[in-house]
Image: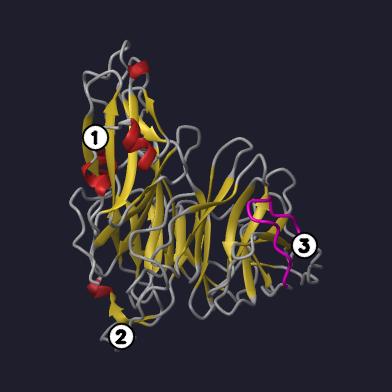
Amino acid sequence: MVAASCAGSGPPAAVESPSPVDGALSQGLIAYAGARGVGVLDPATGKAIVVAPLPAGSAFKVSGPVWAPAPGLPYPVLYFTIHDDRPAESRTTSGVVPYDWLFRVDPFAGVITPVAASYDFQSEGPFGLVANSHYLALTVGCCTTYEVDALDLTKSSSALKVVTKPPTQTALFSEGAAPGVSGLVAVRAFATGLWYWLDLDANVLHAFPLKLGPDDGPIAISADGTTVAVSRPDHGPIIQPIDVTVPSGSSPAAGSSPTPTTTTPHPASKPRALNSKLPHADGVAWSPDASLLALAVSGRLQIYSASGKDGTPAAKTYLTGSGVSGVDWSEAIHGQSFASVKPATAPQPVVDALLKSTKLPAAADTSANRPLTKVYVWQYDSSKASPIATIADATATVLQQYPPMAAAVAFHHWAPSASWALSGGCYRYRVVIKGSIPPVAFTFGLGSNEPCKKASP
């Protein structure tokens, strides 16, 4: 679990609802991930624009995007993850240290913000990114160690934290989220393929109201919480009613593994196929009024009528040949228009800046000195005066007074050990490297090394 963000505790400041504008996005915006990056498409016109460009090829693996709130903004923004999949360094070769990243993009301000970064040398990065107005959740890991991590979007002080993690807790895959401010995330158990609600508020598993298969998912639930679209491994998605209300269950003791409550599932209604000729859909998303369903399928974006008969062709097909792998559809955005969408800078410079900041000094990066090199890292809020900002050496007195984060040498770089140990915002990190060389001290941050302006009293 990482420390709280620098913005302080409590809910984000209230914002006024904007007045409608000409060309307002009454049908919302469709967000997608494609070969060129993360973009948005206007369902009213079919116009699309990439708002977070990524390099061509397989340099980064992307999950998402999803629409969710951000502190102080009257409209939703985009969240997505990337995993640095470029060739990793070894003891005798240069390369990258692989990190998972969570980014936030404001498509109407043209601003991209790193939310968190996590050293990840085992997996191919996060997947199953889902969100509602309360939580963002994702899965990360490999083999049998899949964990679910979550971000509380209702608190400006929130940071990504580990919710469930093997071996003491069940290995779960995040597949969808109940709408609104619910704390319920639909998860599928790795070992059994059974589905549950993971209650992020109570840290408990509830029985899922529908009988879904071990290869089904992801799912999308309509804004009113009454209808679900389920991606199947073949024969296209199915649509059926769902009840997202669950009885209250007793929460296990803090830190214990969530266990299923005795909730009895609601009787499942007969599913209705959308188009049985389709293969597995990588992403599904409802329009604001749930009359349309967007699919990321076969590398393109398709729009279907939710009331059409099985086999009815797509009403619209977009971005053919664009390698579309994820999709989400926003609520109506009355205070913005598509003309106000602005592309942000690419996330790669932020990724590369972290690699530069965590590279070992040349004198320490030798076969003889690497085993002797020690790395000490402290986190502090740069909007406030902090003695950590001026630490010059990791003396015994300093270590006792200011315990550092866990970090270790990884070949030619060093890396923090905990999941999502690095946060963006006003956080900065003071580093001392010593042991094999005289102490070297410096400061860095995700996205910016400059300190934040002092917070108002």
Identify the mark at residue 18; answer none if there is no mark.
2
Residue at 74% of width from left, 55% of height from top?
A: 259
Q: Is residue 196 left or right of residue 18?
A: right
Dot 1 falls on a residue whose secondary structure is helix
Disc 2 residue type (three-letter): Pro
User: What residue sits right under mark 1 in the picture?
Assistant: 356
Instruction: Choose mark 2 or mark 3, whichever is in front.
Output: 3
Q: Nearer the viewer, residue 267 or 137?
A: 137
Q: Is residue 117 left or right of residue 217?
A: left
Residues at circles 1 and 3 in contact by the CB criterion of under 8 Å? no
Circle 1: residue type: Lys
Q: Residues within 10 Å of mark 3 (few under 14, many from 20)?
A: some
User: In the rendered view, would you say 317 is above or below 116?
Assistant: below
Residue corresponding to mark 3: 261
Residue 93 screen position, x and y as percent: 32, 18
Which of the marked residues, 1 or 2, is nearer the chain's N terminus? 2
